[in-house]
Image (spheres, grey):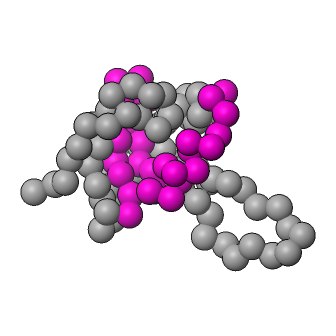
């Protein structure tokens, strides 16, 4: 049985259904505003530190997912080098069968 919960959407703030996936390292989110997206738990934590305008733009990316795909939000897994800027989050569209 899937581990489901009702929580606030990390992007929009509305009540959303979340299903834990990937050994509880990520959540598949079904939001009435953002539609569907997947977010890692690390990315969800970082999301709280981002300005509302940035979260809104990510929500729009989720809403604009090409047919048969949804947005995956995660923290990059590259090692940080001294003096080199890194992205806080990265995004990709993945097919629906890859929950």
Left or right: where 67 falls relative to 49: left
Q: Is residue 70 visible?
A: no
Furthest residue to the front?
49
Furthest residue to the right?
83
Is-magenta flag for residue 33?
yes
Q: Residue 13 falls in which quadrant of the image?
A: top left
Residue sitting at x 41%, y 34%: 9
Toward the viewer: 65 or 8? Answer: 8
Stretch in magenta? 25-53
Left or right: where 33 falls relative to 6: right
- Location of the N terminus by quadrant is bottom left
Vertical position of residue 65 compared to residue 44: above or below: above
Q: Residue 85 falls in which quadrant of the image?
A: bottom right
- Location of the C terminus by quadrant is bottom left
Residue 74 x/y as whole percent: 54, 56
Residue 40 x/y as whole percent: 45, 56
Furthest residue to the left?
1
Residue sitting at x 72%, y 56%: 87
Residue 84 x/y as whole percent: 86, 67
Residue sitting at x 62%, y 63%: 76
Left or right: where 62 falls relative to 14: right
């Amino acid at each position: 049985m899937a581990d489901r919960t009702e929580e606030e959407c990390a992007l929009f703030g509305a009540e959303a259904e979340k299903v834990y996936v990937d050994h509880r390292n990520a959540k598949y989110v079904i939001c009435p505003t953002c539609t569907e997206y997947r977010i890692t738990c690390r990315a969800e934590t970082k999301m709280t530190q981002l300005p509302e305008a940035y979260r809104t733009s990510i929500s729009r990316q989720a809403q604009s997912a090409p047919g048969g795909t949804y947005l995956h939000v995660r923290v990059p897994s590259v090692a940080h080098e001294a003096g080199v800027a890194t992205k806080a989050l990265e995004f990709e569209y993945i097919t629906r069968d890859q929950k």
